[in-house]
Image (spheres, rainbow, N blue to C red):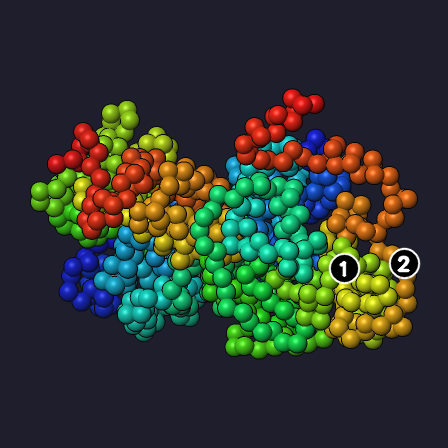
Amino acid sequence: MKVTIDNITIEVEPGTTIMQAARQIGAHVAPPAMCYYEPLKGSGGKCRACLVKVTAGSEKDPRPMPKLVPSCITQVQDGMIVENTTSPQVLEARKGVVEFLLLNHPLDCPVCDQAGECHLQDFTFEHGVSKTRTIEERNTFEPQDLGPYIQLNMNRCVLCYRCVYTADQVTEGRVHGVMHRGDHAEISTYIEKAIDNDFSGNVIDVCPVGALTDKTYRFKNRVWFTKPVDAHCDCGKCSGKVTLWYRGDEVIRVTARKNEWGEVQDFICNTCRFERKKTSDWTIEGPMKVARHSVISANKYGASSIKPAFPLKQAAEQYKQIDDNRDRSFLEPQKQLK
Amino acid sequence: MKILTQHIDVPGIETIDVYRKHGGYSAVEKAIKTMAPDEVTEEVKKSGLRGRGGAGFPVGMKWSFLAKPEGVPRYLVCNADESEPGTFKDHYLMMKSPHTLIEGMIVSSYALGANTSYIYVRGELMYVINILEKAIQEAYDKGLLGKNILGSGYDLDLFVQPGGGAYICGEETALLESLEGKRGNPRNKPPFPAVKGLYQCPTVVNNVESIAATSWIVNNGGEEYAKIGVGRSAGTKLISVSGHVRKPGVYEIPLGITVEDFIYSDEWCGGIRDGHKLKAVVAGGSSVPILPAELILKTTNGENRLMTYESLSDGGFATGTMLGSGGFIVMDETTCIVHNTLTFARFYHHESCGQCSPCREGTGWMDKVIHRIEHGKGRMEDIDLLVDVAKKIEGNTICPLGDAAAWPVAAAIRHFRDEFEWHVKHPEEATKPGAVFMREGASWTL
């Protein structure tokens, strides 16, 4: 099947979704995803971040689709033409989605453990606007205790349902779920109850924001100060393939390995995640691959390896104009001085 | 011309004996004894009956989309989760004459080849559920339900399922989820229920009124039904009228009478209450755009607006509205449109399921902003903000609740912007009890 996304044509298998086809082309075409998580069956379609415009349904029936469609759950048809970032309508809708997601999301990134590896940060940076239009008070939730390992901060939740699917599909028996509805819907256990089973820690990895974080790592560090190293061990319960996060010589966190899209392929058990925090527990494979633009790669490259001119040039060329219409007249005298 | 409510005032019509004395269940006998299931579907197609739940999709066409794989059960589900503000027609029909619905259910299930059917009733209507349960038991006792109906070999079991009281469960896929015992979140479509519905089997979901109308169609033929009404708006429609009219209530009208006739004639609403004038009408339940008096009575071409799907939507959303579910809310000049919009916005905020972000966050945002305007803390830019938020919700959500929340707000600002501006500019005056903005020269100014 042939599908054209942002004027790039690719051949894919029948049954592929638009999102998967776009990811095959590359990161610059792939729509953002806040709720879709490929390894979890049934996820997707909720956050509306990945909405795309289909300008031709298929070769046989080239009519455009009347509404924007969620690319993560819409299957491609032969001859389908999709507009992602080339459609102003899509970009406008995404600005809206960013705004909606941030509406009740606390801007506590400076104290949030997820900062630096947060999908909402990335999504906002790429697709949002720098100004807020809301003056309303944010919705807040009562704190909930989910046991010794998992920290829930419901105020940050974007209700992607990933942790619900994870508990359904990876662990034995789910004890948490979504209670209530609308903007007061929350992730919770029905009667206050610890989430306790061997694979429960995976909900931390799948959470796109800082709603579910690792209690054993809480407030210990910033992700960009740590060094991620791939390692494995001989674990009876899981694959044992993990990423160790070092600060100096100390393992301060263990997570599952994530692919380019931030998705875990091999879910790991709680023993690996929470108990094995010594280098001697692990066979080290080597540094984790980190994308250069990621904030995690900061502090990883010595001054000798990158010339300062390079990042500056990158910044000048790659980054978009900041959407900012504040009064800039104060900049003008400096121009004249020049 | 009355089809559904012809015998509704006969004492004891809720019992099967009285109902049968007035010609009840003749459609079941006719369909099961003399017609093939496809012939019933064909009659419904010919009748031009359109879904009465709000969207107005042709019922016969919906039935013909039903997938019929071998060895897989099919289901008919009746959507009686009527919860739209302003709509109370199904409630009235089920309460007064439950057998009308049950007869329609048997005929429709027979046409679709469904052996198990459900009536999903909103949880608040517990007494209606009791009435239905009693009527179903009577039908079982008379051999109209159960195994081998009327000796034909066709089996049908009919169940009543109370909902939990959520508006979202009126959306067909959320209804199916709820019926399966899950959280009532709408599903992503496709696949549509006609292919994968209840328990992943082909399912048809129809409104109470649509299903009830099928028995008359079987009795009298689809062509007879199509003769009532105008063009593609065939048959009769139950309209539930509320607001500032002399005679609010549920009326069965032949589609095609003029709106003016409907509001002012003594046969129907009997005009606006004494000493007041018509200001605005929400023509089809809270989800449809509100229209000011001059636009609801006449289209922009100067033609009289009719009570039909086409005429009410004439002019698109710029100057038109929708027939929707037939919840006709009439407002006179004492109504504050901002307050009314706040009521609607608060409703959708409360009822959004919280699954997809535009609706979950957007409905709450609109509610809070309108609340501020209504309480004298609005800013001028809030009005444009509301329009923009509504635009960003509309069409970007999983189910139509997002649209339903966005349309009334957008329409209120489209037609009554001056009223919103007055609230922002004169907060002290606007927050006085009973204060209403009077537009100069408007037809509703006294």
Can residue B35 be spotted in the picture? no
Q: For the C terminus of chain B, give its image quadrant.
A: top left
Residue at the (65%, 70%) spot, across then down? A150
| Quarter of the view holding residue A80 | top right
Mark 2 or 1: the one toward you? 2
Q: Position of residue B99 (x, y in %)?
A: 28, 63
Q: Earlier in the sequence, mark 2 or mark 1?
A: 1
Q: Are marks 2 and 1 in contact (CB under 8 Å)?
A: no
Q: Position of residue B440 (x, y in %)?
A: 19, 31
Q: Which mark is residue A265?
A: 1
Q: Which mark is residue A286?
A: 2
Q: Amino acid at mark 2?
A: Gly
Q: Position of residue B407 (x, y in %)?
A: 39, 42
Horizontal relation, residue B141 to residue A130: left or right: left
Residue at the (86%, 66%) spot, across then down? A249
Horizontal relation, residue B283 to residue A146: left or right: left
Residue at the (20%, 37%) spot, across then down? B438
